[in-house]
Image (cartoon, rainbow, N blue to C red):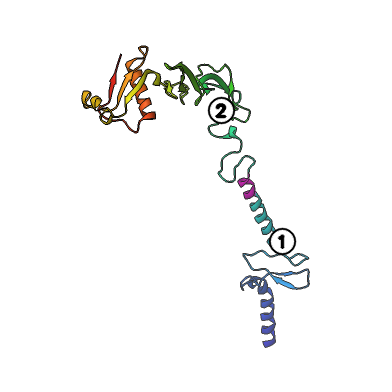
Amino acid sequence: MLRAMVQRARVLSWWALPLLAGCPEPAPDVAASTTGKTVVLVPGTSTSTSTNGTSEGEGSGDDETATASSSTAGESSGPHADASSGAPENPCEAPTPPCMPGEVESAVLACGHCGTQDASRTCTETCTWDHWIATSECVGQGCEPGRTMTMTLDCRCGDVMERVSTCSEACVFGEYVDANQCNFECCARVVYCNTAAASDPDVVAAHPGRGTWCEQTSSACSQAEVREGCLQRVERVCDALFEQFHIDYL
């Protein structure tokens, strides 16, 4: 009887085995490596082997990194980007181009010696202004700054006096100024450099208080010319001008 119970238990265990197979924790999956080693696949990871010992996942990651770097480089170095300022190299691609191709601008420009002339410039195909080009003659010019004009006047005593006018920065000649003085010595003579020191006491007594004494020699000379001639002679023949300065006019 005992033998019959043991055999029945074996039969029940044999038939119950398929039902109890799913209860214990399953064993890890096992995969065969090409190198003959056994590789355990842990859930949540993906590992594969290659014939050169480098995983395909690692190679794929390098490709992705290279692709990302290439993409970033392409974005930062576009064909119309200025690496230093970010502004487009082509002015036509700027938000506000300096001008539009074919556009013409006109102006009145300074020219020559303070003159003016009409001019124009055209916008190029690269949206930049070309050089100004004159479209009219230069008009309204004055004199060249620094240039001088000289006029000559005959003096009373036979010499000449030069008068000079200079062109200003405004291209206009200024007033004439004397470049030298006329010689008027022919209009006067010196009677005494210092009358008070005259050798004749009668002269000193007759003309008390006179210092330098001159007299007019030609009625053709004006009083101003006589005075100037007297001063010129005093400067040449006397040591100094003494007061009271006296002139006898004709």
Q: Residue furthest bottom?
A: 2
**Mark 2 is on which residue type?**
Cys
Q: Earlier in the sequence, mark 2 or mark 1?
A: 1
Q: Quadrant of residue 250?
A: top left
Q: Above or below — where is 44 with respect to 175?
A: below
Mark carried by residue 154: none
86 sits left or right of 64 in the view: left
- The dot on residue 56 is 1
Q: Nearer the viewer, mark 2 or mark 1?
A: 2
Nearer-the-camera pick, 99 or 215: 215
Q: Residue at x 53, y 16 (%)?
A: 139
**Screen quadrant of the N terminus:** bottom right
Name the residue beneath numbered marker 2. Answer: 99
| Residue 180 horizontal/vertical position (percent) | 44, 24
Of residues 112 and 103, the one drawn nearer to the viewer in this rendering: 112
Rendering quarter of residue 100? top right
Q: Residue at x 38, y 29 (%)?
A: 237
